[in-house]
Amino acid sequence: MSSSQEFFAAYDALLARWPAGTTEIDVPTPYGTTRVHAYGPTEAAPVLLLHGGGSTGAVWFANAPALGTDHRVLAVDILGDAGHSIPSGRPLRATTDLMAWLDALLDGLDVSRVHLLGHSYGAWIALNYALHAARRVDRLVLLDPTQCFASHRPGFLLRSLPVLLRPTQARARAYLDRETAGTDTDLGWKQLYALAVSDFADRKLVVGRRPDPTALSVPLLVLLAARSDAHDAAKVAVRVRKAVPDARIEILADLTHFAMPTAAPAQTNRRITGFLAGNDDKQAALGAM
């Protein structure tokens, strides 16, 4: 089996763990065709899921059943990253291109408003989009967001360099094993990530400056990994509170950056579904009576 065949076999194995009724949608945009995994009632409020770099949209298999009970789950293979999305037409070069791509994607899905959920790099995209098109975003959920409220730890970047400069499956797997030690991070996803790093070494993710979250006007939930090596979770929480005073912020014990979202999904699912349902708003209203 060739390396690319091995990657797509691992991809399909994760996708097979999504609930029955999941469908695949290919959405044309000016920047290329975007693969979307869709699950849940078609008439329900949509929630768009944006994965971390190299994870693919298949990574949300442990979250889709809970989120899809009351929402239409739309999990994207980010264009330019590993997966089934195919870049063509206009190149994605800057943050403005990413925003235009998401505008076109939502238009192609016939979605006027959406909840946004992103992890890591996907959280950076999600926050940028909520600032770009607040009229289209109902609620925003960020899982251990990077380059949103704080920079990466220098040590984290230093440990990442060998994987970035000389990507191999073995090197990526060893890196992940270290970064997820002591968690129940899914082994199938770890295999997929290692293959994504080695097979898609020429993938070109759009990166840009940290956005200014003080202008955010939509309800925000931030779930931070207590053992994240990407940044200091406690310090990030302070920065989130300063930038977005009304945000709901929780630090989840025992989780690491790369453990999300496959490790301890019951923890994250409970918090996310409650937030999307507006339970915090209801409790606040009762407390004010």
Image (cartoon, rainbow, N blue to C red):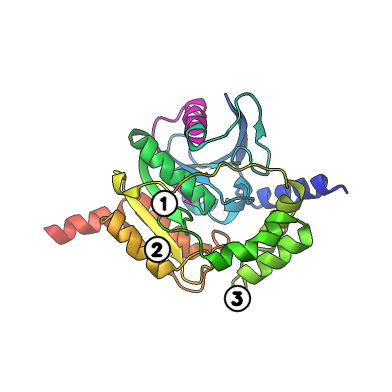
Magenta highlight on residue 115: yes
CB atoms of marks 1 and 3 within 8 Å:
no
Q: Position of residue 17 (x, y in %)?
A: 65, 53
Residue projecting furthest to the right: 1
Label 3: how many Cα within 10 Å (few below 14, some 14–19, many 20+):
few
Q: Is residue 198 above or below residue 31?
A: below
Mark-to-mark CA distance, 1 and 3: 25 Å
Residue picked out by circle 2: 236
125 left or right of 76? left
Q: Which residues are magenta?
A: 98-118
Can the viewer see residue 263 in this picture? no
Q: Position of residue 39 (x, y in %)?
A: 54, 42
Residue projecting furthest to the bottom: 182
Number of marks:
3
- The three-letter code of the residue at mark 1 reads Val
Q: Is residue 129 above or below residue 230?
A: above
Residue picked out by circle 1: 141
Q: Earlier in the sequence, mark 1 or mark 2?
A: 1
Residue in front for this viewpoint, 174 or 84:
174
- Label 2 sits on a secondary structure element that is helix
Residue in front for this viewpoint, 242 or 138:
242
Label 1: how many Cα within 10 Å (few below 14, some 14–19, many 20+):
many
In the rendered view of the protein, which quadrant contains the C terminus?
A: bottom left
The disc label shown at residue 182, or none: 3
- Label 1 sits on a secondary structure element that is strand
**Quarter-wise, where is residue 90 in the image?**
top right
Q: Is residue 226 above or below residue 211?
A: below
Q: Earlier in the sequence, mark 1 or mark 3?
A: 1
Can the viewer see residue 51 in this picture? yes
